[in-house]
Image (cartoon, helix red, strand yellow):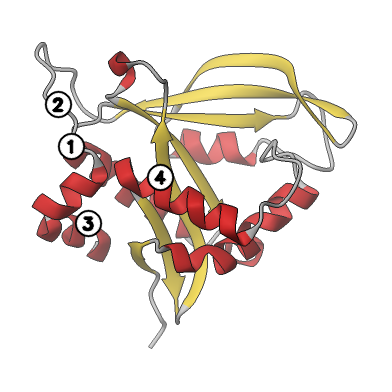
Amino acid sequence: MTERIELRLAHPDDAPQLLDIYAPYVEHTAITFEYRVPLVAEFRRRITKTMQNYPYLVATKGGRLLGYAYLGRFGARKAYDWAAETSIYVARDARHQGVGAKLYAAIEQLARLMGLTNLNACIAYPSRPDPHLTANSAEFHQHLGYRLVGRFHQCGYKFDRWYDMVWMEKIITDHPVQARAVDWFAQLLREHTAAVNRVLRG
């Protein structure tokens, strides 16, 4: 029987394996504008900090980590609480297997449970054919219902080249006249564990 892709919450101890997925993106692509691969301790800290307020998911198959996705704060001011920024990275040899779509579907469901209304993706975008960057990420998001809402020109510099950046947005629920307080993820996990587990099980 073919093994299925499974989702679970990330753990700080996943840092070395997740860093193995992330490092090639830093070293060989402009998908991330980070210049240097972070240390394992720093990556572990990032996971811990994210999960205080937002979901951080990993996809596995046969015990191997294939990719990960998480949400982060969209803006520092209180009024931005109902929006979040998405991030996703999939192992280079695990792309086009449905890993990204499965991670994003779960992230979106958890965002709704939290009370979020908007998901936003900040995506590096090539202004011309480029060996370090394609438009695949923007196309992936468009396929999942995100729409282009803005483009910044030549705002990122990496590999001695200038890159554009686009923002894409997905409205995941109605905007109520009276917004309820957001259930930050640690709280959601404590108070609605069964609902979170249902999302992860698919």
Give percent across and percent down for residue 24. Answer: 72, 56
**Residue under pointer 3:** 199
Location of residue 9 by image quarter: bottom left
Amino acid, disc 3? Val
Left or right for 158, reference 7: right
Q: CA distance from mark 4 to mark 3?
A: 19 Å
Query: Which-is-in-front pick, marks 3 and 2?
Result: 2
Any part of residue 106 in sight: yes
Q: What amino acid is found at the position of numbered circle 4 in the picture?
A: Thr
Q: Secondary structure at mark 4?
A: helix
Question: In which quadrant of the rendered image does the C terminus lie?
Answer: bottom left
For label 2, count other residues whose C-alpha is less than 10 Å away and answer few (under 14), some (14-19) or many (20+): few
Measuring from the top left, give residue 80's x and y in whole percent: 33, 19
**Residue at the image point whose x is 55% and y is 62% from the top:** 18
Q: Quadrant of residue 170?
A: top left
Residue located beneath label 4 in the image: 50
Q: Which of marks 2 and 3 precedes in the sequence? A: 2
User: Which residue, as the protein is rendered here, is positioned at the far top?
Assistant: 177
C-beta proximity under 8 Å, tags 3 and 1? no
Residue underneath mark 1: 183
Residue 33 vs 62, above or below: the answer is above
* Point 18% across, 37% down: residue: 183
Q: What is the C-alpha distance between the residues marked 3 and 2? A: 21 Å
Q: Is residue 18 left or right of residue 125?
A: left
**Given the image, on which type of amino acid does mark 2 rest?**
Ala
Q: Which residue is mark 2?
A: 181
Kindly identify the amino acid type of the residue bearing the numbered disc 1.
Asp
Instruction: Kindly give the residue lying farthest to the bottom in the view shown.
Output: 1
Give the answer, above or below, for where 79 lies relative to 95: above
First in residue order: circle 4 vs circle 1: 4
